[in-house]
Amino acid sequence: MIKQYGKLALVAFGVFALMATPVLARPKWALVIHGGAGVIERNQMSPEAEAAYRAAMDRAVRTGTAVLEQGGTAMDAVEAVILEFEDDPLFNAGRGAVFTAEGRNELDAAVMDGATLKAGSVAGVTRTRHPISLARAVMEKSRHVMMIGAGADAFAASVGLEQVDPAWFFTERRWAQLIKALTDQGLPVPPRPKGAPEPHAFIDIPDDRKFGTVGVVALDSAGNLAAGTSTGGTTAKRWGRVGDAPIIGAGTYASNQSCAVSATGTGEYFIRLTVAREICALVQYKGMTLQQAADEVIQTRLTALGGDGGIVALTPDGQMAWSFNTSGMYRARAAQGQASVISIYKDEP
Ligand code: ASP
């Protein structure tokens, strides 16, 4: 009798453990954020600049955490974090975006919803204050996935998204970077944009080989993933160039079947490798862990092709990963029940 009860208890415990393990293993919500990768080295960063970036990443974690803890969706968290980055001149997104060779700010952004595989993206936007909200509006309020240029701005205005004078996006630091890049390349320097403030002093961050794009992947308490990326592209880009950020599967991807990814780096290489989708495919079809898949694509394939940059990624079971082949990447992660991590340099966790 006792033996039988013992057996029963064992079976009951086994069933309970089986049912409970995945639930216990998966955090209720999780969030991984990047603020761009590149040549980011301790000896080149002033203490002020480093403190400013760490504070911005900390704010981003708090914003995303607040949304997810209150039961908000992964997409809400992605948008909320990127909205703040787009107003922060430290990052190459929205205000603070890099300039084209013609002296304009042309913004790219994308979002993807892992539950439905719905996606929205925009490229070459010049008047919409928040390209990330426009990407979301394309996904939710239009029949299309991607819109570009003046048409995308017109759609933004039609759905009530704030329009600004293009000078809104101007920052002295990015303007100085443009002049340097054009001079180095022997290209003409365009006139200072109309409406830009009078030339003024700014905190320089030496070396312009930093991408500064922003991206977020999130997992919500309903078990859904979302990804979003926003950028001004690359300094002195020409001829209507579009990078990887708004290309679904290259710089941005999310599927509840595999993972969510947001990328930053030399977009041309990320497009050719369809980096974001490739990482998720390795997880989905080869059964790799997220970190293995991310490292395979970034450390091995991207590096072999000659591309620079990195990604942040997340799976529906709460695996969080980042991988980059540059000396640094502004990055942070947070998950329910875990201490958040904010890092910049390669030698940090
Ligand atoms: N990936 C972006 C692009 O190529 C640049 C960046 O990450 O800052 O447009």
Image: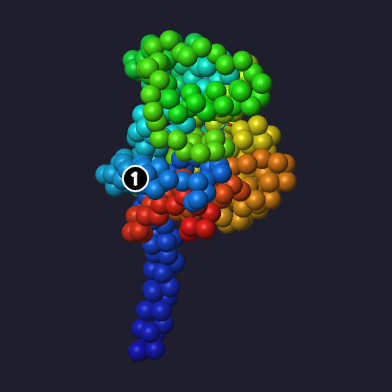
Using the image as rendered, state which of residue 334 and residue 24 is in the foreground. 334
State the image coordinates of residue 151 (x, y, percent, origin top left): 49, 11
- The scheme the figure's colours follow is rainbow
What residue lies at 59% left-to-right and 47% top-to-bottom?
A: 326
Amino acid of disc 1:
Ala
Above or below, 175 against 6 in this view is: above
* Residue 252 appears left or right of 202: right
Is residue 342 in view from this perspective?
yes
In this figure, which residue is indicated by the disc labeled 1? 55
Q: Quadrant of ligand 1?
A: top right
Taking the view exactly as shown, the residue that stands out farthest to the bottom is: 2
What residue lies at 49% left-to-right and 51% top-to-bottom?
A: 42
Q: Is mark 1 within 8 Å of ligand 1?
A: no
Crowd tier of the residue under label 1, counting other residues whose Cα lies within 10 Å: few below 14, some 14–19, many 20 or above: few
What residue lies at 45% left-to-right and 21% top-to-bottom?
A: 138
Using the image as rendered, state which of residue 4 and residue 287 is in the foreground. 287
* Residue 190 appears left or right of 302: left
Using the image as rendered, state which of residue 35 and residue 205 is in the foreground. 205
State the image coordinates of residue 162 (x, y, percent, origin top left): 34, 17
State the image coordinates of residue 235 (x, y, percent, origin top left): 56, 27
